[in-house]
Amino acid sequence: MKREPEAYLFGQVLGTHSFLLRDGFLQPDEYSEIAAQYFLPGGETGTAATVLDSLGVSVRMDGTWIGTEVAPMLKAFYEAKNVDLSPLRFREDDPGVMDYVVIAGLVRSPMGRFATLFSTGERWWSIPKEEDIAGCKAAAVDPFFGAESLLVADICARHGIPYVTIDSRHDSELHRKAAVNVVSKECTSQHYAGMPAEDIMELMKKETDGLTIITQGGGEMLYGRRGEPTRRMKPFDVEVRSTLGAGDTFKAGCVYGLLRGMSDEELVRFASACSGIAISRFPLPLNPPTLAEVEALIAGGTEKQGNQ
């Protein structure tokens, strides 16, 4: 029997077709050998659920509708895990949302039909239910689903449930209400092109009482709160096998940190260690970081931190 969920996750739940190449990334008009390929749960929320379960956290997740190809794989994968799929809506007239990712070490290229899906103007995700969220102790919400993403934030605020979000702008409601907002290099490049990370952080800190974390791939992370100096931390030095799921794993680590009452420094270090382990293996859903592995990496880690 599955345990009552500690964490509620809302957002992208996909079937991911991943292809790990043997000898470098794709080149025009050249043959590439596939070293390994899988069809496994993915998406920002699907991956985070897998990681949290591996860390010992029981999860309930909702978001993207699942269909005839994705649903059987998801149900089989999570059958023996403490991940409650009951809120997910099943569609018999659609195979479900999938993406395709080609990977070679530090480089990956995702492909899908998300632009087409969003351009239809039709909703292909669930409306979150208060009863699914109210009993949880922490949450995570992806920002992609408009009013439904904001509804999760509102429900969490009413029930005093801290939540993690990702890539939410400084002037967004999701950022203002979040306990943690993890902002990726992709987000800062898109929304704050040309601005130094330090200036972006100052914008972020002014708009929320929560913790803002700016990740920069292999570069230093910045983190801080309103009225406090920005701090820095280097990611862990690991051998990279695949970066697929690194950010989603970082998000899961932040949720774990909220559940366990970690300080800001502890939370960022823990999330960074989770992500470090994730990028050292493939495929991540079959080899998610365990708590013992994360603690061991932290104990032997060489990351540095300091004040700005």
Image (spheres, helix red, strand yellow):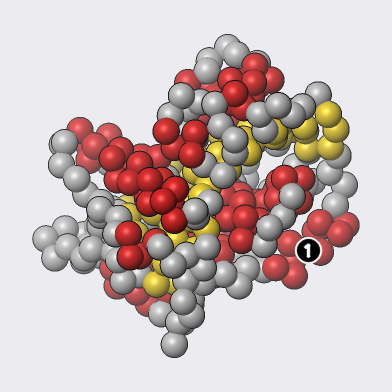
Residue at point 77% right, 27% down?
229
Closer to us: 139 or 42: 139
The answer to whether 224 appears left or right of 65 in the picture is right
Q: Which residue is drawn at 49% across and 34% down?
A: 175
Quarter occupied by the C terminus: top right
x, y percent for residue 98: 32, 53
Query: Looking at the figure, which quarter contains the N terminus?
Result: bottom left
Q: Is mark 1 on a helix, strand or loop?
A: helix
Q: Position of residue 246 (x, y in %)?
A: 59, 48
The residue lying at 14 percent from left, 65 percent from top is 92
Q: Name the residue: 77% across, 45% down.
A: 265
Going by the picture, which residue comes out furthest to the left?
A: 93
In front here: 208 or 65? 208
- Residue 14 seen by the camera: no
Between 116 and 166, the one lying in front of the other is: 166
Q: What amino acid is at disc 1? A: Glu
**Near-viewer residue (82 or 244):** 82
Report which residue position mark 1 lands on: 295
